[in-house]
Amino acid sequence: MDSPDVLLLARAQFGLNIGFHILFPSLTIALGWILFYFRIRYARSGDPAWLATYKLWTKVFALSFAMGVVSGITMSFQFGTNWPGYMQKVGNIAGPLLAYEVLTAFFLEATFLGVMLFGMNRVPGWVHVLSSAMVAIGTTLSAFWILALNSWMQTPAGHVMDAGQIIAGNWLQVIFNPSFPYRFTHMLLASGLTAAFVLTGLSAWRLLRAGDDASARKTLRTGLVLSAVLAPLQILVGDLHGLNTLEHQPAKIAAVEAIWKTEKGAPLVLLAIPDDERRRNDFSIEIPKGASLILKHDAQAELKGIDAYAPDVAPVAPVFFAFRVMVGMGVLMLVAAWAGVWATRRGMLPQRWMLWTFSGFTFAGWIATLAGWLVTEIGRQPWLVTGILKTADAAGGVSGAQLGASLTGYIITYSVMLLAYMVVLTHLAGKGVQA
């Protein structure tokens, strides 16, 4: 695949597939634990309102889980069709990690999901509670293995060369590579915020139609408190993750901060229009020496710029803007959560304008997650596996016409599926629970 346009189409197609897919695991990872919490509340209190709430949100979980499975299967085929060089080069590491995810996580989820959805009146209560716990554990295990592989691609460790093939020399180093702890924690918190705002937003949607719905009030409060706790934690972990990225992927940080030239006392660029061709920032709003102070805790510290890594550097503009969308959405979510917790104190119902605001934030977690994913994946370009395999070297021989046609089909199909998914979710929320 020699043509840059064809390579861009292949990347766009895979990006669309994985971008669509990540929406649903980012919700179900944490939603599984929220369901477990609802199930425990019902088991301990016997309150039918908690049972009704649990049953409603299991429908949301089941639908989201199914969407994730379907999109994940489609995505996995592209390893062979669009990126055969990936498995040829690093398949001895990627293959086992993906297999571990299927064997230890997906099978666990699929097995106990059936009991959780259909077994409440067919198995003892403790078995059903255990099934809810196993589903939640399965979603987290799935994230563990996928993030282990993705982190290894970002900061590879523990591998050796054997007859031209990359193999694992130490599996513990492969799995627990330098960026894995930060990336895994960051993703779990992102999922928690995503699920909390879906819970809050759909509950607010219900309360706009029926303000006396006690179950919706409970779930609204639960979502707000959860997001109010997780949002500042995410900011802290995000900062630690950024420092780890500076240590192991400094070129990505240079792109994120739009630092074109190596300099001491580098400014923090708040907003600008990065120009990749001329390697400069237009209409820049900066804080003098801010980047050096934040990243190295020294206002006079030297930060390497794009010039130190050229030509193996990522396009600056998409990474720069995506990072600011992620951070901006995170700050808005923090403000909305804390304002909501204050507004709902002592069981108070927020004013209608605030309920509309919460409804508008229903999928705010998706926006932040997608923006963060763009930073992570585009920021490591031109590498598919940092320092080992370039993206262009992994691409297959699919023609531009074939990629364009299939990409168009994916866009249409996924747009329809996502619209239908949102319509079903809002319909379920509008009906509310019936204890």
Image (cartoon, grey):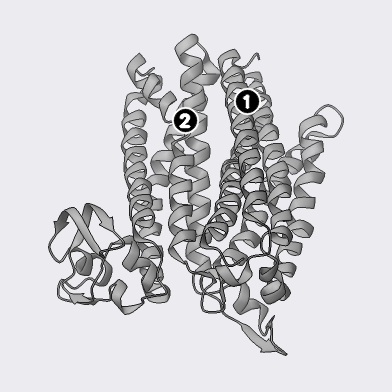
Q: CA distance from mark 1 to mark 2?
A: 16 Å
**Within 10 angstroms of label 2, few (less than 14), some, or many (20 or more) residues?**
many
Secondary structure of the residue carrying tag 1 is helix
Q: Is residue 27 left or right of residue 104?
A: left
**Does 147 appear above or below 283?**
below
Mark 1 highlights which residue? 420
Give x and y (percent) for residue 19.
56, 47
Which dot marks residue 4?
A: none
Give x and y (percent) for residue 191.
53, 46
Q: Quadrant of residue 375?
A: bottom left
Q: Is residue 205 left or right of residue 91?
A: left
Q: Which is more toward the observer, 3 or 375? A: 3
Question: Disc 1, disc 2: CB below 8 Å?
Answer: no
Instruction: Please report the residue visible at 57 percent of the width from the left and 58 percent of the height from the top.
Output: 6
Mark 2 highlights which residue? 362
Residue type at mark 2 is Thr
**Does 218 appear above or below 97?**
above
Secondary structure of the residue carrying tag 2 is loop
Instruction: Please report the residue visible at 72 percent of the width from the left and 74 percent of the height from the top.
Output: 88
| Residue 351 makes an appearance in the image | no
